[in-house]
Image (cartoon, rainbow, N blue to C red):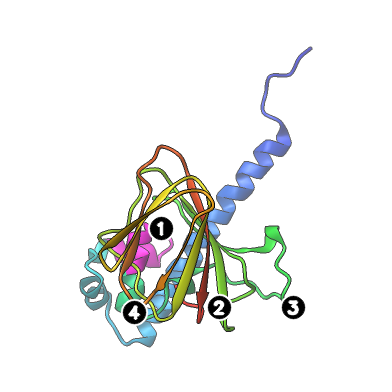
Amino acid sequence: MENHGVHPAAVQELIGVEDQAERAMTAVGALVLQLRREAGQSLGSLAAAAALSPGLLSQIERGQGNPSLTTLIKLSQALRVPVSRFFDVKDQAGALVKRQDRRRLEVAEDNLIYELLTPHMNGQLGMLRAQIAPGWNNEDAPFKHAGEECVTMVQGQLFVSVNGVGYHLEEGDSLTYDSSLPHWYRNSTSEDAALIGAMTPPSF
């Protein structure tokens, strides 16, 4: 008799992904709470500085929110830390990073996935892979961090604005820019876009 049900291994994999996302939200919330306390800010003052509602910030700190990347950018700027602080942190020895061991920042609300390709962000060079969902853009909360950055498209197309100058990137194209200038991305297509980004010094 043919089995049309879901394979148990597939169910287990799905549960694993859901558990990973839940752990990531909990870790992000705990980190936001820690950074807020270290900065001596109240929940209300941080919410105001990041232009967020106190209710949303409270949910995030309790691991119950699903913050968008725009929200994380606003929080990082208000807390004066790079967005990369929100990556899931694991202890790793040596410089080898196996694919399954990459640190991930998965923003479920935006369907974005950031993976750190270098072991950490404490050296002279940082590299990451970003998967950007159709229709997403961060024009309202552009990135701005010290250093120089180069992005290479590995899948799809992307519009990149650097200090008000726009560039249309297709698969195989690269763009290098001063990352201290405000820059933002927009995926106007109906397909995922993916890029590899390198930055020195590591910041994001």
The amino acid marked with disc number 2 is Met
Mark 1 or mark 2: which is in front? 2
- The residue under label 3 is 94
Q: Which residue is mark 1?
A: 64
- Where is mark 2, residue-wise? 121
The kind of residue on which mark 4 rests is Leu
**SS of the residue under disc 3:** loop
Q: Nearer the viewer, mark 3 or mark 4?
A: 3
Whichever of callouts 1 and 2 sits on the residue coming sooner in the sequence is 1
Q: CA distance from mark 1 to mark 2?
A: 27 Å
- Disc 1 residue type? Gln
CA separation in Å, label 3 and label 2:
14 Å
Spatial CA distance of label 3 from label 4 is: 30 Å
Q: Which residue is mark 4?
A: 79
Amino acid residing under circle 3: Gly
Dot 3 or dot 2, earlier in sequence: 3
User: From mark 1 to mark 4, how far is it between C-alphas?
Assistant: 20 Å
Q: Residue 141, percent across and down?
A: 28, 64
Identify the residue at image location x=40%, y=55%: 66
In terms of sequence position, does the residue under pointer 4 or pointer 2 come before the other? 4
Q: For numbered disc 4, what is the local secondary structure?
A: helix
Camera-side residue: 7 or 170?
A: 170
Q: Position of residue 28 (x, y in %)?
A: 46, 67
**Residue 158, how many percent across, how many down?**
41, 50
In the rendered image, residue 58 lying in the magenta stretch gets the answer: yes
SS of the residue at dot 2? Answer: loop
**Image quadrant where one finds the N terminus:** top right
The magenta span reads: 56-73
Label 1 or label 4, whichever lies nearer to me, is: 4
- Could you tell whether 104 is left or right of 51 in the image? right
